[in-house]
Amino acid sequence: MNGTPWWRDRRVLPWLLQAAVGLAVLVLVALLMTNLVRNLSAAGLLLSWRWLGQPAGFDLSETLLPFDASMPYGRALLAGLLNTLRVIVIALLGSSLLGALVGMAAFSRNGLLRGLARVYVEVVRNVPLLLQLLFWYFLVFLALPDGRAALQLPGLVLAKSGLYLAGFAGGSWQGPQLLNGSWQAPLQLSVEFGALLTGLITYIGAFIAEVVRGGIASVPRGQWEAAGSLGLHGVATLRHIVVPQALRVIVPGLTNQYISLAKASSLALACGFTDLYSVAETTLNQTGRAVEVVLVLLAAYLAIDLLISAAMNGLNRLVQVRER
Amino acid sequence: MIRAEGVEKWYPNGFHALRGASLTVNRGEVVVIMGPSGSGKSTFIRTFNALEDFQKGSITVDGLALSNDVRQIDAIRREVGMVFQQFNLFPHLSVLENLTLAPVLVRKRPRAEVEQQAMALLERVGIAEQAEKFPGQLSGGQQQRVAIARALCMEPRILLFDEPTSSLDPEMVREVLDVIQALAAEAITMVVVTHEVRFARQVAHRVVLMDEGVVVEQAAPEAFFTAPRHERTQRFLEQIL
Amino acid sequence: MGTPSFAAKRLPVAALLPLKRLRAQLAPTVADGLLSLGLLALIAWAAVQLFGWAIGRADWAVLQLNSMLLLVGRYPLAEQWRLWLLGGLLAAQAGLSWGLLRAWPRADRREQGQLWPRHDRIAVVVIILLALLLPAGLRLAGPLQGRWGLLAAVLLALRWAAGRWAADHWGGRLHRRGLKLLGLLWPLLYLLGFWLIGGGLGLAAVAPGDWGGLLLTVVMASFAMALSFPLGVLLALGRRSSLPVLRWGSVAYIEFIRGAPLITLLFIGQNILGFLLPAGMSPDRVWRAAWVLTLFAAAYLAEAVRSGLAAVPRGQLEAARSLGLNQAQALVTVVIPQALRVALPTMVGQFIALVQDTTLLSLIGLLDLLGMARGIMANPEFLGHSSELYLVLAVLYWSCCAALGLGSRALERRLDPRNLAGSP
């Protein structure tokens, strides 16, 4: 075991390789960082968070917390983050529902329904999301009529000025009403928000439909037949036999889709919705604080991803354990 | 050819697989290693070509001491061929390419010459007509014969067989053992881990019993099967015979 | 949603009369029948609306007037012959590859005894129709129409000749060498392409800022695909390595990139990369975006390759090592080819996503296909005609992505070991 030169010793070589790679990365990072510090100090933009407290000077069209132009950048970014979260939560629910329905439609007895589900998935998945968002915003929602001509559905009015939903107001159920030529309703959404939601839900819904379809298809055919031979039918088989088994396959796939939904929500500025990213971009344009703004963005999206992962991992454990 | 002395191995999980195993294999000798599962026999022969490392003891193969010197390990691997339980043919290469890959890459021999040799070897193991097929299109027995030819194509001085027939359907065991037997007749040094008693009796020069990480008994086949000296060997033979 | 379609498929449907068959598909029960009727009405209504719009209100002049902008952006008119030349070379190379690959000996094909199966002939018809009808339908200028026709003719002629020749003259060995040649020609053409597009070395330089439209989209997507591939393989190997520094380094990189939305990474590329490099060394805006796309795609590709690596049994590496191959040889000749075959569908999925992701370039002010289209829509002259543009863009992206998906499925079948038979 002795007398092996160190450069041919297989106990040493792995460490040499690692040291070389590690050193190369460190040197690169050090170089970039030195440049960053030098260039930033030359531009007078060394890392500082004081600008967060300065008045933003721009307005946000719709926010969950009160905001106006005199309030600081920090609050603007917070308002943007809340808008992002609002989009993610609603789109997550909507796309799950749509995806589950379309995914199950792939197993329908009705050939037409199966075909339609297939066409929907194939069309939506192969067209860029950004294009779809622009389509929903400019060609659908901004083309809606307004006032008396607005599209009126039970409990929902779609108009160019916004979306009006029925809801509880002052303890009673109220639908949208036309007052002096403009619509009033307990729940109002902007067309920007509506277009973003519609686009995200239909896009991610198609991917979730594929996840659901794959999950159901992963349940062996013998399970359907066994359930049928026990006298269970259609919905009952699905509910008691197939879905619990399919969920084991579906939940990990869903996690990926939810995370990609969270990231996709950053395209909100395509339809003029002020989410975190679009506030950040405006902030950058006004302050020039590129590094700080990017750090905020990365931290926020990382936190959202981790939150989704953690929640879905919990759900996954629940689904997997129940089988044993 | 192979001299292993007091080899001890711990797996990273702390399992003490080899506890001072020693074995000497002479040139041209066929040694069969038997033993209950988990006795360390596979691990033992895998240390001979450094597929497994070991912590204590020493192994010398063909005059080269196994150390941590990568150049020496490469040299030993070139001289030691191995046939696996799961065949481990490369599924993305044709049968012929399976044979020629290593001689061309490692020994830097001209492709045409290697292909000629490979065809001769395939002829010898009786599957020359399948040379252009892919492993997935062959039966288990055929695959294992290709694996033997692949090992031979490197012209090794020692061949190691790690349970070569254990994952074969019963009707294919014979064809593979026949090939190994024919090789034994050509005085190639071989170490074979197997459960095939009939094969051991007919082919082996020496049969070795391993149990709990040590070599318990070694003897000529007749003596091993008819008059085992150790109590552990007797128990093992009772179970398999 | 009722019983699954298995139930319907188990009926001897084929034996039934067409009408009954239709009924079994559309109206197995009364409720299903009503549902089908409703859906049919909806589809018919949508079709009538779309058709009425397409031949009535739609005004395709917006496309005729801007066809070159959409195709190549502000690429100088005097230098556009280079792009047509490149198009011709690409068509020739594609035809050559198509023909040679078709003639590749395959057990199933040989049994059928035909070089061009049905879907190949369908593809040819589609190409001819696209090359003739589309430019004519858009009423492009005469020379333009002629060039499109010429490209298609080159493609089809070479495909026919190569396939014929290879089928008649080639056996196993020669064929494999020919395929190796193809593997060499594509990277060569790739480099040649960048030279023709960008200029330099005797050609007039065309700044990346002048590339636009479909050209920019294709350049960006192919650049990122080609470079992210080796990077992704390295990252995947790193992530599966037993060496902690390599493993944790790869994990950190992959998870960082996958955790951030692409738009924020492009944002970094545009606003921070300049600070990270020495003054004056920062590349052009277009190249900055191209590198960000590459580094972005590499992380996703690494995950695809990793799943492929996990599917290769440990015994494969051991067998290669026991034959005397060193670690690098074993990885390159044994492990990686098998891993890539397993990872192929996922990898193509990532490439499709990458093509779609190039649209985000329009958000950082680059004039890719979508950016160019938005620029045209903003022009008051074409106000109210965005539907036509959106439709054409959607069809274009859809066909690119769907074609990639189809190609991947064909390649998957082809690389399946069961179809890889040599000469009988």
Image (tube, coloured by chain):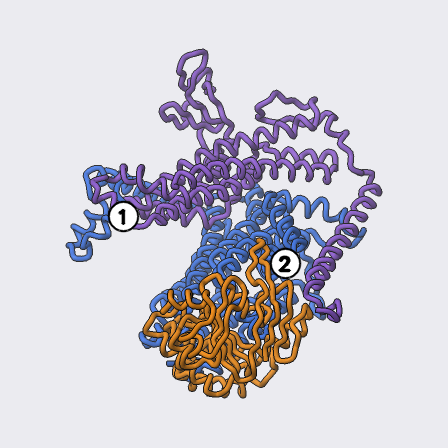
Chain colours: A purple, B orange, C blue
- The amino acid type of the residue labelled 1 equals Ser
Question: Tag 1: Cα neighbours inside 10 Å, few (<14), some, or many (≥20)?
Answer: some
Choose the circle earlier in sequence order: 1 or 2: 1
Q: Is residue C321 left or right of residue B93?
A: right
**Element marked by disc 2:** loop
Q: Are marks 1 and 2 on the same chain?
A: yes
As helix, strand or loop, the secondary structure at mark 1 comes to: helix
**Residue A110 picture quarter:** top left
Q: Nearer the viewer, residue A17 or C79?
A: A17
The answer, for residue C406, to whether it is visible in the render is: yes
Q: Quadrant of residue B44?
A: bottom right
Q: Which residue is mark 2?
A: C75
User: What residue sits 81% from the left and 51% below the top?
Assistant: C279
Tell me where residue A11 appears, x and y as whole percent.
Answer: 69, 63
Q: Which residue: 47% across, 21% down?
A: A187
Residue that numbered label 1 is attached to: C5
Image position, residue A203 (x, y; %): 46, 42
Q: Nearer the viewer, mark 1 or mark 2?
A: 1
Q: Chain of mark 1?
A: C
